[in-house]
Amino acid sequence: MREQLAKALTALTGVLIVVAALAFGAIQNRPDAARLAPVDAERLAAGKAVYEAQGCALCHAIAGEGDPAYPLDGIGARMNEAQLRAHIAPAADLAAGFPEVVFEMKQAYHTMSPEDMGALVDYLRNLK
């Protein structure tokens, strides 16, 4: 009897773990509108050009190219559009989240044109 109870409890625990993992995966991977918005190849090329023109690879890497200390591979899966914009050109109240020299350098991105910022964000958003 004890052996059957132990087997049933083990099976139930296994089922609960699988159900919890599936539920967690569904919550973490739910699509949002920003991730599903299609971005055409021309827009991605424009964003990549902004990335290169701004010298982003001096501090970041994509696909192993650039400074490997801060890779951006998969950033589009971790940050939404608003988060990317806030990270590229952080507001003054976010200064504590960055080393002082990095925060000061990022302040220059506030002068980037809205078109360039949008293209850069779309490019990064599509790095999944």
Image (spheres, rainbow, N blue to C red):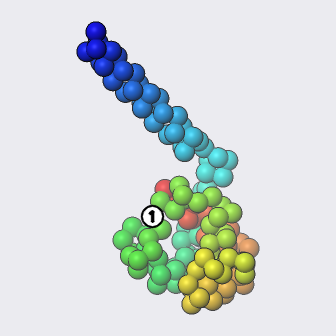
Give percent across and percent down for residue 128: 49, 56
- Residue drawn at 54 percent across, 71 percent down: 48
Q: Which residue is mark 1?
A: 73
Q: Nearer the viewer, residue 98 or 128?
A: 98
Check disc 1 and give the amino acid type.
Asp
Q: Which quarter of the picture shows residue 124? A: bottom right
Dot 1, how many residues are within 10 Å of its Cα: few (below 14), some (14-19), or many (20+)? some
Q: Nearer the viewer, residue 67 or 104?
A: 104
Q: Could you tell whether 5 is left or right of 33 in the image?
A: left
Q: Secondary structure at mark 1?
A: loop
Give percent across and percent down for residue 12: 40, 21
Q: Is residue 105 above or below residue 114?
A: below
Direction front: furthest residue: 2
Q: Is residue 110 above or below residue 11?
A: below
- Residue drawn at 48 percent across, 33 percent down: 20
Whether residue 39 appears in this view of the structure is yes
Q: Could you tell whether 11 is left or right of 103 in the image?
A: left
Q: Is residue 10 above or below residue 97?
A: above
- Residue drawn at 64 percent across, 64 percent down: 83
Q: Nearer the viewer, residue 124 or 9?
A: 9
Q: Could you tell whether 110 is left or right of 23 in the image?
A: right
Give percent across and percent down for residue 117: 67, 73
Whether residue 43 appears in this view of the structure is no
Give percent across and percent down for residue 24: 51, 39
Direction top: furthest residue: 1
Q: Which quarter of the picture shows residue 68? A: bottom left
Q: Quadrant of the N terminus?
A: top left
Q: Which quarter of the picture shows residue 78? A: bottom right
Direction left: furthest residue: 3
- Residue drawn at 66 percent across, 69 percent down: 85
